Amino acid sequence: MTDGRDILGGRLLVVAFEGWNDAGDAATGAVRMLKDQLELEPLFDVDPELYFDFQFNRPVISADAEGRKRLTWPSATLYGPTNPAEPLSGLADDAEMRISASNNDNIYLLVGTEPSRSWKAFCAELLDAALTHDISAIICLGSMLADVPHTRPISVFTSSESAEVRQALDVERSSYEGPVGVLSALSDAAEILDIPTLSIWASVPHYVQHSPSPKAMLALIDKLEELVDVVIPRGDLMEQAEEWEQTINSLASDDEEMAAYIKQLEAARDTVEAPEASGEAIAREFERYLRTSDGRRGPVAGSDDAKKAPGVVAGDDARPGARQSDSDRTDKPEKSQGDSPSDAGEQASPDTDDENDPEKD
């Protein structure tokens, strides 16, 4: 059995997929930001013909710098360092990885679109490629729509199915049972092969979405940096996150109903996080919220002003993720592997665990 501490060393594969697991494009945005910071090259691509329904995930046509048109097909690509480091068999207690121009050879990335079919074969093919490149651990990034205020730090939930990883990194095991996304299928297959996995999920405010959602991207990167002890340059992501929040503030200032709903979410969040908060106080706050909102989600930014605001679009409670394929999705994310926690149409109880667990109904 792989020791949990190996999650901090060796070759790490960071994974994100567009679609159901990617509200506000936060997960794929975080991985693509890493790709821009590192010296990586494509190592492997799946064959789109095997895994995608092109009526739902359509190819995109674009022109290159010389004006030639070319098609880009939905796929999934594994990226790796130009000069990979030798795989490590262990990690000293004071070991530390840092992403920099001179030491970026431990991080591999997998990014693409959630497949339409043949998930078992899809996962098997990707894991075969990972084993070929001696990947020692997999970190899955996801994001989901949730009842959280945009004015507070983005809630992040981290889990692992590996007992050794949970003990080494002091993270939880998700208790979710239900429909899942492809991240859970990949994690399950990896654990069977004795490749330890870690899932990091960010909660994106459901009532307004930004593509990408820089504040959720930043939260995922912060947690990734904290857990695996890397230093990741942020670029102008913090400025983008501030602009994103200010844009939503501007929309809310012109919508009394939306502003009132955000204040309710803020009050619930602050009650949960208050040092003196007790279970009874949290329960009272939740009951008050249910009485004032009838247990339903609040307003979304769906007015003409919201639609005109750059990058901000109306929230969609029918979807766990901010973006899907053209097909309707009826799944719910899986908690056992770190997939999206709750049905997007239900309000989770604001106790301490639920606030940090994106997968609880």
Image (spheres, grey):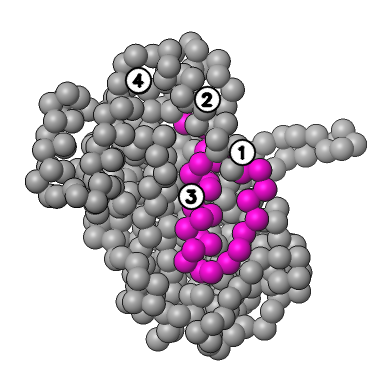
Q: Position of residue 281 (x, y in %)?
A: 13, 43
Q: CA distance from mark 4 to mark 1?
A: 24 Å
- Crowd rating for badge 1 (residues with CA inside 10 Å; few <14, some 14–19, many 20+): few
Question: Mark 2 is on which residue type?
Answer: Thr
- Quadrant including the C terminus: top left
Question: Which comes before the other along the chain, label 3 or label 1?
Answer: 3
> Mark 2 near mark 1, Cβ–Cβ under 8 Å?
no
Question: Mark 4 is on which residue type?
Answer: Met
> Mark 4 near mark 2, Cβ–Cβ under 8 Å?
no
| Picture quadrant of residue 184 | bottom left
Q: Provide the residue designation for mark 2.
A: 247
Q: Provide the residue designation for mark 3.
A: 219
Q: CA distance from mark 4 to mark 2?
A: 14 Å
Residue stretch in magenta: 209-237
Q: Position of residue 26 (x, y in %)?
A: 51, 44
Q: Residue at x 43, y 84 (%)?
A: 2
> Mark 4 near mark 3, Cβ–Cβ under 8 Å?
no
Mark 4: which secondary structure?
A: helix
Q: Provide the residue designation for mark 1.
A: 239
* Mark number displayed over residue 357: none
Question: Which comes before the other along the chain, label 4 or label 1?
Answer: 1
